[in-house]
Image: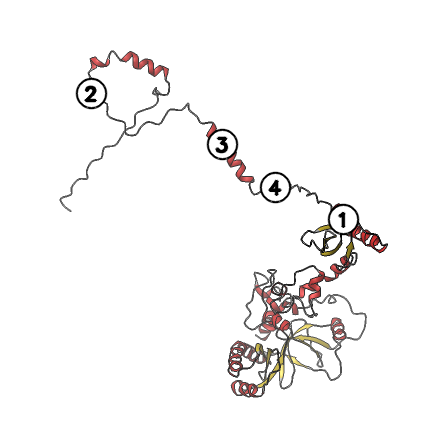
């Protein structure tokens, strides 16, 4: 029973994700096959040295243990327990003990410890593999986190504190609860901690986080239609300023440049280096060209087409686009003390290149043309050779004398022979109509 429980608890969503997070977002079979779920799979680490024999004889005693959200720490395996990735362990904490999941073992732990400047002096220890009682207590306190967060928000709102409680994390044994909050200014917690201690009956710990860390914990969908980078794979948050948008020729619009956290989007830094390399071949955006007519200043730069737009100081509405190499020649000419010809003479009109679509999917009217032509052909060519439909209710012929009808028989035969449409085919039979009889009366009813 213990082994079954431990294997179930090795799933990513039940150990490091949000307690209210639902499973089954990464595959149809849920987290049991992929060991990841929702916004917790950025904590999963691929051990690419697992199948490589260690050349050194010394084995590291440290392992990396992950907890809820993005919290990780290094612990020492003092009892030489057989640990692997996904093992649920009971670790040292202050006070009591905490429960986490091993996320990394082996030589990669040394690399991570060196990267994060972790000191090996007085490390925290791993007590044991989590037993059934530890896991049951852990699940009970994790189930209370959502209700505790709502109650804590009500208490802080009643005290009129300018803060927002983002997340709540219970320790594995329930001896301590940590409240993560965001605030613009300093907050006085003296009365708040008293209210929390009397309401929750445990040790209270308050930790302030930034707005980017809040978005990483909560998660969401960005303007690109994908899940937020900070809640999926981004672990380090670099500073983003408006110069990154200016270098990429983006309009300084706070509503478009801001993310879910209210700060500038982290993706503004992704292609910034490529733009800087491309702009190194461009003259400065403050470049002015002294022409015969007057001075022209730069208005716009197109990084992809390598063109620059210029306009005269007295006629700023008329723009003239020039190639970068041509602009460099004009600047060199100005440095010699010579004035350049007018921009109107150097402007080159772009000839639109007609693209050929091999699969012809860009033509919206490709289906309508066929129907339109077929409709015209049908209207032009109407068959007139077929017999006209007979009238379903022909008028009853008037009774005539046989003697009066004889002189006209010859004339009717001639007209029928001249007009084949009026002639009856030999196979055509007169339409029979069924007589409608009233229903019989049933005297026994």
Q: Residues within 10 Å of mark 3 (few under 14, many from 20)?
A: few
Residue 103 lies in quadrant: bottom right
- Disc 1 residue crowd, few under 14, some 14–19, many 20+, Cα 10 Å: some
Q: Are marks 2 and 3 in contact (CB under 8 Å)?
A: no
Label whose residue precedes the other's in the sequence (1 or 2):
1
Q: In the picture shown, does residue 166 fall above or below 335?
A: below
Q: Nearer the viewer, mark 1 or mark 2?
A: 1
In front: label 2 or label 3: 3
Q: Going by the image, does 441 lie left or right of 97?
A: left
Q: Earlier in the sequence, mark 2 or mark 3?
A: 3
- Mark 4 / mark 2, whichever is N-terminal: 4
Return the residue at label 1: 342
The answer to whether mark 4 and mark 2 are in CB contact below 8 A is: no
Residue 116 versus residue 247: which sits nearer the camera? 247
Q: Quadrant of residue 5?
A: bottom right
Residue 10 seen from this side: no
* Residue 107 position within the rendered picture, expressed as x and y whole percent measured from the top left: 76, 71
Return the mark for residue 251: none
Q: Pointer 3: what residue?
A: 376
């Amino acid at each position: 029973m213990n082994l079954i429980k431990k294997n179930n608890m090795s799933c990513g969503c039940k150990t490091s994700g949000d307690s209210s997070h639902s499973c089954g977002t990464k595959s149809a079979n849920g987290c049991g096959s992929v060991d990841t779920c929702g916004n917790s799979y950025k904590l999963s680490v691929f051990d690419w040295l697992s199948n490589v024999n260690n050349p050194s004889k010394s084995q590291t005693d440290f392992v990396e243990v992950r907890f809820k959200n993005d919290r990780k720490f290094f612990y020492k395996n003092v009892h030489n327990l057989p640990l692997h990735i996904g093992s649920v362990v009971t670790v040292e904490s202050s006070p009591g003990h905490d429960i986490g999941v091993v996320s990394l073992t082996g030589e990669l732990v040394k690399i991570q410890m060196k990267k994060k400047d972790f000191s090996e002096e007085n490390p925290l220890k791993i007590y044991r593999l989590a037993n059934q009682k530890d896991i049951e207590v852990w699940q009970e306190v994790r189930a209370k986190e959502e209700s505790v967060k709502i109650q804590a928000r009500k208490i802080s709102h009643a005290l009129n504190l300018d803060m927002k409680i983002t997340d709540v994390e219970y320790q594995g044994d329930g001896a301590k609860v940590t409240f993560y909050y965001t605030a613009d200014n300093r907050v006085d917690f003296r009365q708040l901690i008293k209210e929390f201690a009397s309401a929750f009956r445990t040790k209270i710990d308050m930790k302030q986080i930034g707005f980017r860390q809040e978005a990483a914990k909560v998660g969401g969908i960005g303007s690109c239609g994908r899940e937020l980078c900070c809640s999926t794979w981004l672990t380090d948050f670099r500073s983003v300023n408006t110069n990154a948008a200016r270098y990429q020729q983006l309009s300084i619009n706070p509503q478009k440049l801001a993310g879910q956290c209210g700060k500038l989007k982290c993706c503004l830094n992704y292609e910034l280096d490529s733009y800087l390399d491309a702009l190194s071949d461009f003259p400065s955006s403050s470049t002015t060209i002294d022409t015969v007519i007057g001075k022209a200043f730069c208005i716009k730069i197109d990084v992809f087409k390598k063109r620059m737009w210029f306009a005269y100081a007295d006629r700023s509405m008329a723009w003239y686009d020039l190639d970068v190499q041509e602009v460099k020649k004009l600047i060199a000419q100005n440095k010699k003390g010579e004035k350049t010809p007018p921009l109107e003479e150097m402007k080159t009109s772009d000839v639109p290149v007609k693209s050929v679509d091999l699969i012809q999917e860009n033509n919206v009217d490709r289906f309508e043309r066929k129907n339109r032509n077929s409709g015209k052909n049908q209207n032009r060519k109407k068959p007139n050779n077929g017999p006209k439909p007979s009238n379903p209710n022909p008028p009853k012929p008037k009774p005539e004398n046989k003697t009066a009808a004889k002189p006209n028989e010859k004339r009717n035969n001639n007209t029928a022979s001249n007009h084949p449409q009026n002639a009856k085919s030999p196979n055509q039979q007169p339409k029979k109509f069924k007589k409608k009889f009233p229903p019989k009366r049933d005297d026994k009813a």
